Image (cartoon, helix red, strand yellow):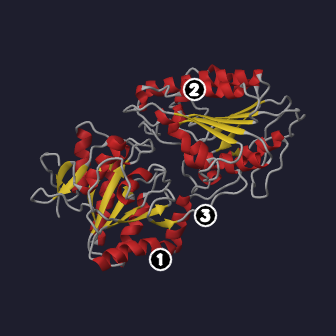
Amino acid sequence: MARNKPTRSQYAMAQAVREAYASGEEDEVLEPLVLVDDFRKPVGRIQDGDYVIFYDIRGEREVELTQSFVDEEFQGFPTEKGLKVSFATMIQYDEKLKVRVAFPPLGEIEGTLSQVISEHGLRQVKIVESEKAIHLGFFLNGKRDEPWPGEERIIIPSPRIESYDEKPELAIAQVTEAILEKIGDEGYDLLIANFANVDVVGHIENEEAIRRAVEIVDTNIGQVVEAAQRSKMTVLVTADHGTVERWLYPDGAIDTGHTDSPVPFILIGPQGSRLREGGELGDVAPTILQLFGLPKLPAMTGSSLLENGPPTKPDKSRILLLIVDGWGFRKEIKGNLIAQAHTPVMDRLQREYPFTTLKASGKAVGMPAGTVGNSEAGHLHLGAGRRIYSDRLRIDEAIEDGSFFENEAFLWAMRGAQKDGTRLHLLGIVSFYSSHGSVDHLLALLKLAKRERLKEVYIHSMLGRRGEHPESGARYIHTVEEAARRLGLGKVVSVIGRFWALDREENWDRIEKTYRWLVYGEGKAVRGVI
């Protein structure tokens, strides 16, 4: 454990986070903090026989940390020998994980765009860099891992760097090269590609890097569209959600999160097409099927965006769907880093071709009203062609109707800890706005633990900057510490930036740092009231 001088406060962990801010740290990459007792011994570490509830949602970034605790064949880094932990997760992160799942998946979504394309004997290829591979594969295919017959996936490795603002171009050159190659191959009927830059770099507080990312993407859109037009392909350009088109809160603070803005939708060919207004992401798949002249399945309840239908059906239809990740649409210039960037290609396409905007947040993507969009929900709806109710909405409704407090997985963990005389650990993001979870879910678990008369409940909190005001983390931790004080149960014993804990690129050094924080108490010592 790092030998730092402990601090002491009634709300010790919230105070420690504020002190970290004063020394130049911020929520997303906050170095681990660990509560210690008067003898400098870490409090509330995960020990053999303990029970853990990982209450995050979404899941793709939670897999690696969960693996390190439950996978007997785990080889990412050395783990504590003989440590057996009983694990429950809020949703299913991966079907191979040996955990109890509180809200299991409702099953694969049938009748998606990729399924219909496959069943009609057409070939499709999806091209993306690894940072967004799960979105263009698993989520776009309706939470299906395996490709459909006739589906190919090309995944370009994202650069392995400390922070993506160091290289705002990411791997876009290689992605574009792969797109151009497949445009030239008439054996593929549908090409779907993702440019990740605007979303990925947009989460970092670096205005110049974001502008650079926007402009790089604009240039590459131009290359791809030009090649597709030469090959007489129909091109659809859209996005999954917004980010940097609203980079400032009303008070002027920087907002590095997703937004509730609509996203652009541009149709390049066939001639004479018109687009209707009032669309949403779930209308894109029906539009593509109509352009192909294919029927949609009854489950696909979205509606084509073509106001008049394609005037003529070419003998050999080929379509490119280009998803410009994080490119939201907003007319106001102030705080709009897309509007402030030099984007001659997108500007021209919006002027010269049929253009509309699509709803990409809130109820339109199966989320609670007023919530921002995200890549998971965005790609899911682009592929599903209908509204799919999110895990967050399911959980929120379960809390409201009381079924949350009778959930079998939660009761298994809490009653198991009580029966075995061990401890319960609540692990996850602490935020109101993160797509990875909600502090409300944590507070509901604390109330359930109180009802079940548990004695030892330890809270291990992750903080993030995305979608939050600067230095929000300390306020969240204070909220949780105050709730635990009022309940007379639970203690925040660990805080860390989500950069270290939530990874999907096998950056095992980050996950190991998080594991050692949880198990051995490695981090800055924080002395509080025990």
To which residue does mark 1 refer?
406
Image spot of residue 339 (x, y percent): 57, 27
To which residue does mark 2 refer?
217
Sooner in the amino-acid sequence: mark 2 or mark 3: 3
Sooner in the amino-acid sequence: mark 3 or mark 1: 3
Residue 193 drawn above or below residue 100 = above
Q: Are marks 1 and 2 in contact (CB under 8 Å)?
A: no
> Residue at coordinates 44% horizontally, 63% vertically from top-left?
98
**Identity of the amino acid at label 1?**
Glu
Q: CA distance from mark 3 to mark 1?
A: 19 Å
Q: CA distance from mark 2 to mark 3?
A: 36 Å
> Residue at coordinates 55% horizontally, 45% vertically from top-left?
134
> Residue at coordinates 55% horizontally, 27% vertically from top-left?
172
Image spot of residue 286 (x, y percent): 77, 46
Decide: few, some or many residues near mark 2? Use Cα within 10 Å; few <14, some 14-19, many ≥20.
many
Quadrant in which residue 206 is drawn: top left
Decide: few, some or many residues near mark 1? Use Cα within 10 Å; few <14, some 14-19, many ≥20.
few
Front disc: 3 or 1 = 3
Residue 106 shows which numbered tag? 3
In this rendering, the count of numbered labels is 3
The answer, for residue 27, to whether it is visible in the render is no
**Identity of the amino acid at label 3?**
Leu
Sooner in the amino-acid sequence: mark 1 or mark 2: 2
